Amino acid sequence: MNVEHPGLEMESVAVSYDGNRIVEDVSLSVRPGRMTGLIGPNGAGKSTLLKTVLGLADRDGGVIRLAGRPLEEVPLAERAREMAYAAQGAPVHWPLTVERVVMLGRIPHLGPWQKVTERDREAVARALEMTDSLHLKDRIVTTLSGGERACVMLARTIATDAPLLLVDEPVASLDPAHQLQVMGILKNLAGQGHGVLIVLHDLNLARRFCDDLVLLHDGRVLAQGEPQEVLTDENLAKAYGIRAMRWQAEGEEFIVPREKL
Ligand code: ADP
Ligand code: MG
């Protein structure tokens, strides 16, 4: 990984759907070597923000810079190599083998009509290994359990070998062991120099694994910075309308939503 990669920067980004402002004045960056958590209530605009970066939703204000250049100036094929995206829920309807689904992550590296190379196969094998999914490679993806599928979709994202990873709720609906596994894999990738932007709801996973957090509320950034600066009682009350209990154990703080305000 090139540590000089300037990552992804959003400045005062605004997005509307059908004339309604959904995201307003959002500035954040995804830096190599860092894992940034995007948190906030349902409907806050988290997925919309990710889709905007991918060009799947139209921005109507602000600037997005990818690797130091305005996003508009970066050709689509290059964007696809720079940023790997795992959509929320990411349903799979085609009866493809796991290996082929993960190979889809290599598409940004293939020229038109170009055959899969040894390098692509290696990237796929490495991604399957990293997500403990190698044993699933010949399975039909539609027959997997939710947890297995989540690992395979993460493998597809990893196989892209993109400097930046944008993952939308990769641990929702996973059991605690798979949650820790997926968070650990993403943290390791950040440790290797990737920039990771992860949408998640679990405040404890967010606090423990993310280097910084962005708390979105009604399409705006309510707080951003180190997890403990963001996950204050006041911010949790404002964003989620909850009171949380906190306690310390094993040198860490744990947050448990206690009541709706
Ligand atoms: P989050 O991911 O934070 O839960 P979303 O970004 O999915 O929230 O949605 C933010 C808001 O935008 C919601 O009110 C949602 O209903 C609305 N929205 C999302 N996608 C569309 C769309 N394609 N057309 C119109 N409204 C949308
Ligand atoms: Mg969402």
Image (cartoon, rainbow, N blue to C red):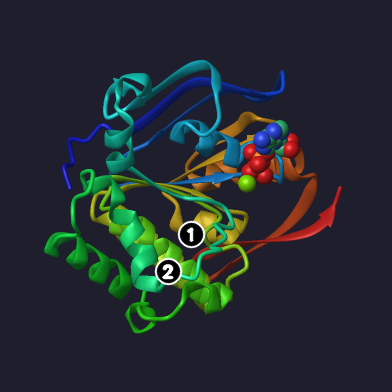
- Dot 2, crowdedness within 10 Å: few (<14), some or many (≥20)? many
In the rendered image, which quarter is residue 145 located in? bottom right
Q: Secondary structure at mark 1?
A: helix
Disc number at residue 133?
A: none
Q: Position of residue 183 (x, y in %)?
A: 44, 63
Check disc 2 and report the residue beneath it: 152
Of the pair 129 and 207, the residue shown nearer to us: 129
Q: Position of residue 46 (x, y in %)?
A: 59, 40
Q: Secondary structure at mark 2?
A: helix
Instruction: Name, please, the residue furthest toward the left.
Output: 118
In the drawing, does residue 25 fall left or right of residue 187? right
Instruction: Name, please, the residue furthest toward the front.
Output: 113
Identify residue type, mark 2: Val
Task: Work out whether residue 169 can be spotted.
Answer: yes
In the drawing, does residue 219 fall left or right of residue 241? left
Identify residue type, mark 1: Arg
Q: Residue at x 37, y 56 (%)?
A: 157
In the rendered image, which quarter is residue 80 located in? top left
Q: Position of residue 135 (x, y in %)?
A: 35, 84
Is 235 situated above or below 113?
above
Of the pair 34 and 127, the residue shown nearer to us: 127
Of the pair 202 and 155, the residue shown nearer to us: 155
Q: Residue at x 55, y 24 (%)?
A: 58
Question: Rounded to the nearest whole Å, what is the CA distance between mark 2 and mark 1?
Answer: 24 Å
Mark 2 against mark 1, which lies toward the viewer? 2
Task: Work out whether residue 232 can be spotted.
Answer: no
Disc number at residue 208?
A: 1
Is 20 situated above or below 31?
above
In the drawing, does residue 199 fall left or right of residue 196? right
Of the pair 110 and 9, the residue shown nearer to us: 110
